[in-house]
Amino acid sequence: MKYTFEVSVAGCNTECAHCYISGGPAPAVRFDGYKRAITALNGILKRIDGEIYVTLGDEIFNHPQIAEMVSFTHGLMPSYYSYNDFLVPTTGIALLKRKDRRAVLEALRGAGCAGFMLTLHGNKAHQNAITQNNAAYDALKEAAGWLYGEGYKLRFNLMLSKFLVSDWEAVCGFLAPFPEADRVLTIPLYLPTDRLRGFQRYRAEYGDCMELRGRLAEAKIEEERFFGRVHDNCEQNIHRRLEKNESIDYAEEEGRTPQWSFFNVNREFDLFYGNVGLHTKRLGNLMEDSQETLAERIRALPANYDWSAYYQLSNLPPISSVIRGVQPLNTNFVYPGLADCVYSWFDRIGVQPILL
């Protein structure tokens, strides 16, 4: 079993429309309390067998003591908390405001950080609209230039939307000064949260994606793989396949997902089962409950990578009634996979998730 524990530390400067954790401004945790909580978490993790990852969540550069926080956490649990093979996501806004940015980056480098991931949504107006921050585009551009000049690896996460398609020429222009940076074209998730329900007005449909035919190479994106995913995971084609078969065994689908469990520690040091913003069960508090008790509760839980992370499988309607319920299907949205598409249909017909 794999386990990921994300510790929320400092809120975010943006409230991105595609963000499943519903990120936004929040106070920073007290560093003295954090040290006690993360020490308790370390004791819990030593009682669990598996492949364990600890990450610091939110826009970490918002925390005034993030350099000390990173160094303390990596020193305490180097096998759990490390940035090896992991790029730190950032909007750049908080980083640019820091006078100690080089010291912060050195602390991250000491924990194995080699680079950063920056998400681009389109031109300036659309970047600022989707992130709901009028400084977002300029900050991303300035941060990218500064980090690139400092020799850090960059990966641009191009978040697919109607805007990204219409702004493709501007997107390529943004990327041009960074020829050695990685680029990925990401199809946004759909999960049963208000934030992602609202993102549907921006979600690209099959026809939007076809406008990018022959244009992805300019951004160093592999066309065949991307359009294969678009074809397989657009609503209309998923609907046709399910109409023909009229069968999904939800437990069987669950069994195909990775054996991976996600947990979150909030700013009050409560431990939750479920990813950030997608909690389904409170397990206790790192400051109040014994390490053995919390470890036992964690060990007793199955993986929550997908379906059962959001729904009680035994209460889900047959897929035949779901596909009838969404007819006529007048949209052809593109999703990253079957599950995300079906979750959007659950929402259309009123299936309730189990999220707290």
Image: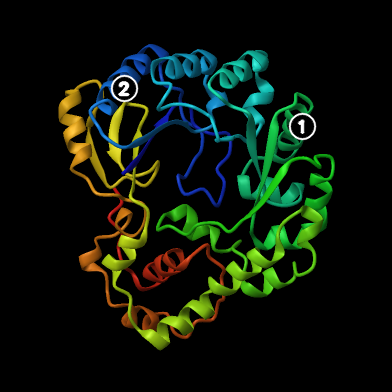
Q: What element does badge 2 sit on?
A: helix
Q: Residue at x 29, y 72 (%)?
A: 249
Structural crowding at the residue carrying mark 1, measured as other residues with C-alpha within 10 Å and reported as few (<14), some (14–19) or many (≥20): some
Q: Nearer the viewer, residue 38 or 227?
A: 227
Q: Quadrant of the N terminus?
A: top left
**Which numbered disc, 1 or 2, marks the residue closer to the eye?**
2
Residue name at image x 47 percent, y 59 percent = 190
* Separation (CA) of disc 1 from disc 2: 37 Å
Q: Position of residue 307 (x, y in %)?
A: 33, 60
Kindly indicate whether the residue at mark 2 contacts the one at mark 1 (C-beta within 8 angstroms): no
Can you give x and y, in whole percent of width and height, for residue 314 in the image?
20, 66
Answer with mark 1 or mark 2, whichever residue precedes in sequence.
2
Neighbor class of circle 2 (other Cα within 10 Å; few <14, some 14-19, many 20+) is some
Quadrant housing residue 354: bottom left
* Residue hosting label 1: 142
* Amino acid type of the residue that numbered disc 1 sits on in the rendered structure: Glu
Q: Which mark is residue 42?
A: 2
